[in-house]
Image (spheres, grey):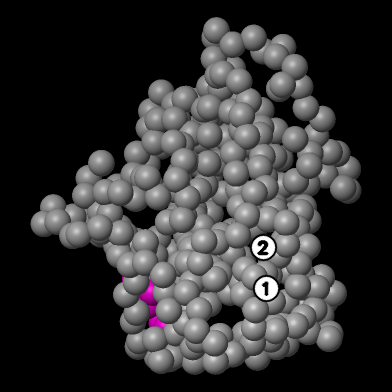
Amino acid sequence: MVAKWFMGVAIALAFGSDAAIAESKPAKSRTIELDVDKPLPALIEGQAAQLEVVSGFVDRLTLNPEFVAKHGIKPATLMGNADVNFWGKREIKGKNRPISYEIGGAKEKGRAFWFFDVPQSNMDGRIGPFAIPYDIVVIRLSAPTPDEKTHSLFYFGDVSNGSNGGHVDPTFRTTVNFAVEKRSPYPLASAATGAAIAAAYGGTLSGDVWEEEIAFGVKRPVRLLSLKTPFKIGQFSFSEIAVRARSGGDGGGAGDAIAEAASQNSEDPAEIVVLGTGKKARQPIFTFDIGRNFLDSCSTIAFDKVAKQIRLSCRSR
């Protein structure tokens, strides 16, 4: 049986695929260590830039429109448009072009993307591990301590789909994203992952619907899932999870129903949804996002493209 992993957010060229465009491979056996809250110096087409390192979104080099305008960067003549798809639904349109950039002396040829009318980085742009031209990208989160343990997950993805980990539970599997750039009081599960966790660990929904930002200002409705038995991934243990409300709008909202807590009115209109059926029904996507506040017990997170591992060094929570 071939394991299939489903990723939530992706950048795509608006007209065709860039699979045939050669992008340089990272230098062998090279490691770069980065401080999570410090800007990453880079040269983009020979121009100095300060980049924000992200790990919970797409890994592509995405530039602020102000930086693009200042340095006269123009969209490609062919395939110069770009889309951002959230769980299979197109939400944001932008521009892109082939570009050369350099980080820490390592040179790369790829594509830069920029998007308008969305929240921008407070630096010149963003970049994720797959787009950083090193075999191993280590993000330092805090000072190490003697009581740390290392946990690893299977690492997969690409520059357009992001840096994803794979978690296999006894009854389901899900993609896991560690977002060093995002803080949220709860981890975020897609509807399908939330239903699988609820079934396996005794979960019920309660409370009102609220909106949780996914990326670039795009928000989705969620509800609180409480578990009788904590759901664990490595050193992390979760008793409460924000779960995408079920809807037919995209794959993140496609999933089985979850039982309501005993005190919750099951006829709450906020939970009456229409799910797609037939050929156009959205395929459920299994994702689980862990934000920065849950990584505060970790000193580093390493993205190893050679060993295909995400390694976290953390204290027990």
Q: Note whether residue 160 is visible.
A: no
For label 1, the residue is 113
At horizontal 78% and vertical 62% (from top left) the residue drawn is: 93
Q: Position of residue 94 (x, y in %)?
A: 76, 67
Which residue is at the front of the view, 183 or 59? 183
Residue 137 part of the magenta segment: yes
Return the disc, 1 or 2, that comes first in the chain's sequence: 2
Region of the chain picked out in magenta, as a range: 134-139
At horizontal 50% and vertical 84% (from top left) the residue drawn is: 48
Residue furthest out toward the front: 70
The quadrant of the image that shows the C terminus is: top left
Q: Amino acid at mark 2?
A: Ala
Measure the alpha-carbon separation of dots 1 and 2: 12 Å
Q: Mostly what secondary structure, the magenta segment?
A: strand
For label 2, the residue is 10
Report if the CB atoms under discs 1 and 2 are less than 8 Å apart.
Answer: no
Within-10-Å neighbours for mark 2: few <14, some 14–19, many 20+: many
Assign a secondary structure to mark 2: strand
Q: Position of residue 27 (x, y in %)?
A: 43, 91
Which residue is at the front of the view, 256 or 226? 226
Which residue is at the front of the view, 170 or 183? 183
